[in-house]
Amino acid sequence: MSVYGINKVCYLAQQDLNFREQLRREPEKALVGFPLSEDERRAFLKHDMAALYRLGAHSFLLSRLPRFESMGLSRAEYIKSMRTLLTDDERRALEARGQRS
Amino acid sequence: MAEIVGAFATPHMPGSPGLAKQNPESDTAQLFGAVRSHLREVDPDVLVVFDTDHFATFFYDNLPTFAVGVAERTSGPGTDDWPGLTCYYNDVPLSHDLGRHIHATGIDHGFDLTQSQEFTVDHSIIVPLHFLNAEDGRMKRPMVPVWVNGIAPPLPLAKRCYALGQMVRRAIDCWPSQLRVGIVASGAISGDIGGPKAIEGQPFAWPDEDWVTNVVERMRAGEIDELLNEATADRLRAAGNVSGEMLNWIALLGAVDGRRPRFLEPQLTGGNAYGAWRWD
């Protein structure tokens, strides 16, 4: 519904240094005023990246969130959440590929 | 009349300027260096750069499928564009006249480009130009950015990007100026940033090596129709969320008019390739 709002938050996290800092320190306050549904707002605050992805957010833009520790999100949390989107076969293939390197 | 004298294609990994400085023997430094040597030998007066912006110059509020920069200068990358990016250029000269000419020629040929007269550019332009066009920390030749949306689906058709390259070639051919023009294409062949298959601890996934190998072989063999038919939206999506950057390579192929590359090397670990086409 409001995928634009999700992408816009990610966009501004890079473009606007004040917003970036506020999103890191006071995420609830930072997200006020964006066209987000309650589910989307909750997904940001609970670090549920998979939910934002399923709603249609662009993964390139989402990946900016752990870079700037937006909402306190770490890279490890980001990957863990995104990997819940993989099928078992995809997860096994990814693990096998990692061991080859 | 103006003429195209060479074409050059590289990826734009933000870490590569730093890596090349630290380790000049690295594959990445050597491959960028090889393309740079070709460009310096040909020594064009001006560059036309086919590029995919990464939501820095453009965003979903206003996101052109194809656009051309019509201005005197630019700078970039903007706000903290990417961690590890070690180069920033606050004065990147542009060829306003050639940009305006490409815009007008496009309209005349049924190619309705968006124009931008004020913009900054991101690492996808700065990194290739850092390697190919910088001398003593300054950009040597003016350039014209021609943007192709290779990141926000729906992407343009490959054959349409090829036609864009052909139109740019026609525009250069009919430009009443004795300038020697180089074409640059920026982008990976396969890449996925921030998707579910991201590698542990990294923002990116493993590249689609089969696709990179296939694209390089098609370009070496001059099998352009086959490549245009294979580079579908589904195939590009399967190769990763920034694999549409290879549409810049397709635009370059439209501009080189069937020529085979003088130099073309894949870099499978990064999903990349490096190429040079020469007229001499």
Image: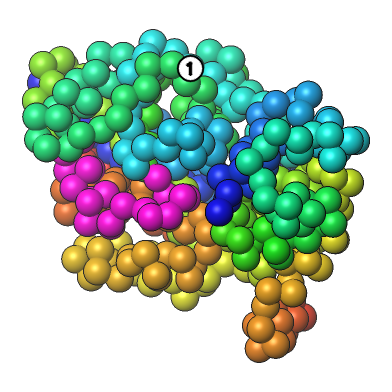
- Picture quarter containing residue B185? top left
Residue at the location (26% across, 49% down)? B161
- Specify whether B252 is left or right of B173: right
Residue at the location (52% across, 64% down)? B240
Q: Nearer the viewer, residue B271 or B221?
A: B271
Q: Nearer the viewer, residue B126 or A34?
A: A34
Chain bearing tag 1 is B
Q: Is residue A12 visible?
A: yes
Q: Position of residue B137 (x, y in %)?
A: 59, 19
Residue B266, placed above or below residue B14: below
Crowding near the residue tagged with mark 1, few <14, some 14–19, many ≥20 C-alpha atoms within 10 Å: some
Q: Position of residue A32 (x, y in %)?
A: 76, 35
Name the quarter where the N terminus of chain A is drawn.
Answer: bottom right
What residue does disc 1 label? B74
Name the quarter where the C terminus of chain A is drawn.
Answer: bottom right
In magenta stretch: residue B157: yes
Find the residue positioned furthest to the top: B72
The residue range painted magenta reads: B149-169
